[in-house]
Amino acid sequence: MTSPGELERTLRANLRGEVDFGAAARALTTMDASNYRRVPVGVVAPRDADDVAAALALCAEAGVPVVPRGGGTSIAGQATGTGVVLDLTRHMDALLAVDPAARTAVVQPGLVLDRLRDAVRPHGLTFGPDPSTHSRCTLGGMIGNNACGAHSVAWGTTADNVAELAVTAYGGTAHRLARGWAGAPAGLRELVEGNLAVLRTGMSGGFSRRISGYGGLDALLPERGADLARAFCGSEGTLAVVTEAVVRLVELPAAPVLVVLGYADEGAAADAAAGLLPHGPLTVEGMAEDLVRSPAGLPRGGAWLFVEMPDEGAARALLRGADALDAALVTDPAGQRALWRLREDAAGTATRMPDSTMAWPGWEDCAVPPARLGGYLREFRALLAAHGLRGTPYGHFGEGCVHVRIDFDLVTREGVARFRTFSEELADLVAAHGGSLSGEHGDGQARAELLGRMYGPEVIALFAAYKDVWDPAGGMNPGILVRPARLDENLRFAVLPRTPFAGEVATCVGVAKCRSTEVGGAGVMCPSYRATGEERHSTRGRARLLHEMLAGETITGGWRSPEVAEALDLCLGCKGCRSDCPVGVDVAAYKAEFLHRHWAGRLRPVSHYVLGGLPGWLRLITALRATRAVNAAARRIPLPGLARERALPPLAPVPFTRWWRGRGPGVRGGSTVTPAVTVTLWPDTFSEYLAPEAGRAAVRVLEAAGLAVAVPARRVCCGLTYVSTGRLDRARTVLRRTLDAVGEVPGPVLVLEPSCAAALRTDLPALLPDDPRAHRLAAAVRTFAETLEEYAPHWTPPRLDRPVAGQTHCHQHAVLGDAADRRLRERAGLSGELSGGCCGLAGNFGFEPGHHAVSVACAEEQLLPSLRAAAPGTAVLADGFSCRTQIAQLSEGHRARHLAELLAEAL
């Protein structure tokens, strides 16, 4: 067999696309969104179909298998492999043509589904299958898994919506597949004609969600027109590589209506689902109360069906025919989105148990005929209980497809043995109900071993023969579907050490929400990926590299790993992943821990000392009364270790606490009402030395609202800059000194800078978990708006009656929340939305060398365009000092202010 080095050189010489057999590229593709891990020999990003053919020919000559990969969101392990991974998302991601009249589109395999849907929406069309990963899954991956989604009850699976496929087999032979035998590999027609009885009997009794195995193989029957393209769908990369597809489009309903039906329990909802199908619903989704954090807005009941109808007339007819406990009919699009959000949030809730332990995939999408769903769910719940396992089912009840994540122990020998036994018994239960082990995600390694329990031996033998006709050398994704690996082999947890950090890193399940490139909305994750498009700069990519670093097989440098350091270098520390990732992966915290260990016992980069030690430097400059000299020098002499593209913000002539101490005693407590509450105003580094005008404004507003204001007499610091540069021991020292200075907190602690407030709420108790003072201070922290809402609820803010634009701080979004801010802005007559995403400066990030381009790209995604589009007279609002600095440096003529400043000016 050819060595990896020889194969890499040969591929580089013959392909126009990228060839990368390096440690980082391999580490990034060891896993998909499943429980499995397989290490490839290298990664190829082909430019076009010719590159694909060349790669397949060269790999076949070398005897190296090939794994086609799209977004890597597969849940059963089929997007992992030990050979060469073909990354089809880098270059082969084009929408080649749209024919609105014929309702078809021509796509490349790496095209993300939402890009197709956005392009055809102006024609009133869409692609019917819509899995929940629509913002990052690819058409090639959907074809490979025969993906479905919520609307397949009306529009079918991917196989129902594919007209033609261009595919290339292992060895480099190209085929064009449609209906009829043209383009079939040699021997396929003869195989089918010799097994007609098996196809007609062994695969009979199917239903729409029979996806398991080569579930579309009966499409090759003569009475079904020998549909080669349909039969190929769902083959999970085991037959050939899709290089182009002609897909069918469907008409979007003009005014769909949502009906939510309440039932006494999950079983009753499941029993009712099949009876709704004659009404022609677009989707019938189900969930029970154990997935709903708050049932506000839902009809009465312990379980619900979300039924989308094409119009109001059809919806009312459904209501008359539905035997539900309670119901709600929603025509307003905003109201529909709010209710769908409850359903979508429930899917996220399923990844964690109520006690915050993780639930894992593996049995994510079994399906049974809809009429049998109620009985199946009751037996499934009983099976979980019998094995001492927990899971919260939900899913596409109209098609009998159930999603569930289960709290398997996939680490210990006993836990893995239970996982295996449960899997075997669940496969038998699904088969007993006439169901399919996979209802839309494919079998992969998770279930292929158990296909014999669903299909008879003759069908399994036919599957093997079908695979061999297409792939006689066995080079396409071996170990998947045919001659499969065991379901308890290659588990990704086995290679990790038993440490808390490893446990945190392993929580990334790989669903790749961080790879979404959708612009707009309040989400933040992941700004660096959105700027670079590189997997290593996504939340998932960084977590995967850390996983491999801990495993020590592909990433061998441990905590000194240059691959991990490079990937984390462009992490802005925005914490968007903490809130936007379905499982709360917190790469900012992982980065801090990595930097702490990476630089232990070594000289750090200069920026870590300059920016990481910012509070100390500013305190020293102020004590020496050198503010004016430093400001003058900063304008002329670039500081070492900092980006030369950036001007340093000037220090304020008078720090906030000096101004505070200079106020006369008669000035404090400016309200005529005796204050009932004393608010401790935290002099964070930014409000103290760089923007004291925000602190002065906050004092004025708080006193006008009838609150007394106190300021700590001794020096305090949240430790943020030390945490963000990974100087965790120094951060702990600073925080202990701060706790000593603060003492017992008598009431709310108002922190004006969102990043400092977030650090006190989360980093402080995480770094000093055994100090009860840390938890008390964290619980006392409030934002400006929270303080006014909670402690001055009857105060009426001044009316500004102006539109606003600007930036919601990413730490506010991720840690603090901005609901109180929205309400305060509304009461003050400030209309409009602030930008989501990240401003791109992100504390020290934008001032560090090599970061300027990414910093600007982040600002250009949402913030800067919103400022350019703002009407004259729009107030520019940004509570974060970094956000205000970015706006001042990159926008023309805009001065952003803290909300406290806007309110103070209007008093």
Image (tube, grey):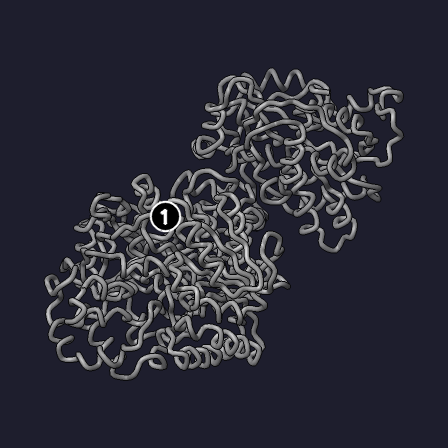
> Which corner quadrant holds the C terminus?
top right
Residue 751 appears left or right of 409: right
The x and y percentages for residue 273 are 46, 66
Q: Is residue 411 above or below residue 653?
A: below
Residue 148 in view: yes
Q: Is residue 344 above or below residue 464?
A: above
The x and y percentages for residue 371 are 42, 73
The x and y percentages for residue 700 are 76, 24
The x and y percentages for residue 627 are 67, 19
Provide the secondary structure element on which disc 1 rests.
Answer: loop
Residue name at image x 22 percent, y 77 percent: 199
Compare residues 649 and 455 and report the one nearer the observer: 455
Residue 236 appears left or right of 525: left
**Residue ID for mark 1:** 253
Residue name at image x 43 percent, y 32 percent: 853
Residue 386 appears left or right of 665: left
Amino acid at circle 1: Pro
Q: Residues within 10 Å of mark 1 (few under 14, many from 20)?
A: some
Compare residues 796 and 579 and report the one nearer the observer: 796
Quadrant of the image occupied by residue 648: top right
Residue name at image x 46 percent, y 24 percent: 869
